[in-house]
Amino acid sequence: MGLKDFFKTRQLKKAAKLQNGTANANGQDLKAQPPDELLCTLWTKCQGCNELLYTSELKKNLSVCKHCGFHHRLSAQERIDQLIDYGSFIEINENILPDDPLNFVDLKPYKNRLNEAQKTSGVKEAIITGLGSINNQLTAIGVMEFQYIGGSMGSVVGEKIVSLIENAIDKRLPLVLISSSGGARMHEGILSLMQMAKTAGALKKLHEAKLLYISILTEPTFGGVTASFAMLGDILIAEPHARIGFAGRRVIEETIRQKLPKDFQTAEYLLENGQIDLVVPRPNLKQHISDLIRLHSQNTKKSFSGNGIDKTMIDKILARI
Amino acid sequence: MKETKKDFIALDFEKPLIALSKQINELEQKTLQNGNKKVVNDLKNQYAKVKSQIYKDLSPLDRVKIARHPQRPYPLDYIQLISPTWHELHGDREGKDDGAIIGGLIEIEGQTIMAIGTQKGRNIKENQKRNFGMPSPEGYRKALRLFYHAEKFNFPILTFIDTPGAYPGLEAEAHNQSHAIAMNLRELAGLTVPVIAVITGEGGSGGALAIGVANRILMLENSVYSVISPEGCAAILWRTKDKVQEAANALKITAYDLYKLRIIDEIIPEVEGGAHYNPKETSEQLLIAVKKHLEELSRLSSNEIKKDRQEKFRNIGIFVNA
Ligand SMILES: [Zn+2]
């Protein structure tokens, strides 16, 4: 209890500093920082149960809380580190960068938003794409970065996904896309909307090439991303409790003028409604994807004489009946 | 043009015209008695000037208002104005016939065409059936069934788009709105028959695109097409719905903007003030444009038609390749 309160005040102080724009601005500030910094990086408050967790332990557990099972959001890079065999990832198209085709200005210019997003997220756009191995099986993989303008899809995200799909077709690789997005990026107007058709069109070609596409839906996946490539997987997997949908909860509540059930648009709700194949907890995700890729690559067998299923496995199943 | 035959609902920017026209009418009554025609003629000239000025300087938000005008012709009106026949086809074969999506067979110059559109209602009763032109997943699946039908019988597809967007409701989500839209986007990409889409009113985001992945995209002059409504955009990015004018400007949603961005292929002219002042003339312009593009596409082979559409969308996007 005492520790929690201490943590809270430190967090507030840190937030205040960030707001004043002085954090990390000069050496003096940094010198004043160590105790806070140390504490903040040492401990993380679980967003599910509010327990204080050792950050290093939490990371080791793939950012899943050991108390309540809450899946904390991952950066695209963390996701790649968790899924792709160590050292096997080769990024492609990292130099496809955003433009400002409409000279869009709302409360601030889109150009500034892009700069800020690049700084805060550490990536150049809202998706990382590349080739890498999942348990020794080469895969074309794309991971969205929610920290970058809410993982929104503009021209760059569309182009990188399409190029990745073309790579998969060209090299005959399975495709894995991991979504986390608020939808289309308004600042690129109609160009963003058209990325839905652009990515879906490329997936038509992948489909005709009879290649496997596994779509992983993570917290949160909405709007133009759900209504295009994210829902078009041959197999759809969601992480526990991830919120997935077309329209946002508030928009729906305003439209139908009634409260929505608590579990509405959760991964579990989607599973129950027949919209996805599986809800897979993060610790099992890599093995699941890997198994699915392996199973889909075994389709040219001509001889079926073999040893069959392991005998101890059969005994186990028989004992259960 | 006689504008008094029917009672037109005036939009806010048309109010000066209403006032002037009232003045003219009153004066005309008087001049019948005392015979001074000059004042009336002066006023009529002024009316003409004000009118052409108003319609020349329409802002994007003004066009939104015209696109949403309650008297604007809807897809079913255009269909019946351009085709001698209309054989409506109903249902998704899985439990529903969504009234917000209409589809059926029409004829243009002796060629059977599959016409599909989003349909708004004119009154409360009609809108119970049409859901204000906001399709449910079942509506998109009905459209998909009709796309496949057209593909099987080699009919070109002509879609009419006028929707605020796909319906954001509880059932729509439970029945997988996202998947229904996504499937249409993917399957339209694979068709080998020509597809022409005409935005006749509101092109509301993914709900419009789901029947809009076409070889040629045409827009009526006062229609709009956008990733999000100006109201929605203002609420999210400006955090107030008061900034709807700013959002409408920033989003680039008019036919002229989208032609400049090379998203659409042609702007179909409307009569001054909007299609509702003369639906017949606008439908004639629409037919001319559709026939022109059908003719061009008819010269392509099935594979070329598919490739043409795929490449069109493959190439959309503006970015820097460093
Ligand atoms: Zn927890």
Image (spheres, coloured by chain):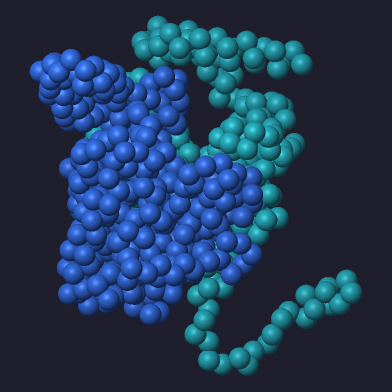
Which residue is depicted at the point 72% across and 27% down?
A51
User: Does residue A287 lie above or below A42 as drawn?
Assistant: below
Quadrant in which the C terminus of chain B is drawn: top left
Which residue is depicted at the point 16% across and 24% down?
B44
Question: The chain shown in cyan is which?
Answer: A
Q: Nearer the viewer, residue B62 or A28?
A: B62
Question: Which tint is chain B?
Answer: blue
Ligand number 1: quarter of image: top right
Q: Nearer the viewer, residue B238 or A109?
A: B238
Quadrant in which the N terminus of chain B is drawn: top left
Which residue is depicted at the point 53% across and 73% down?
A296
Q: Is residue B7 rendered to the left or right of residue A57?
A: left
Q: Nearer the viewer, residue A298 or A240?
A: A240
Residue A287 visible from this viewpoint? no
User: Does residue A173 lie above or below B238 as drawn?
Assistant: below
Q: Position of residue A303 (x, y in %)?
A: 56, 92
Q: Nearer the viewer, residue A292 or B261?
A: B261
Q: Position of residue A202 (x, y in %)?
A: 35, 62
Q: Position of residue B173 (x, y in %)?
A: 60, 49
Q: Position of residue B227 (x, y in %)?
A: 38, 41
Residue farthest toward the front in the current orientation of the protein: B33
Which residue is depicted at the point 44% across and 61% down?
B184
Residue B188 position by quadrant: bottom left
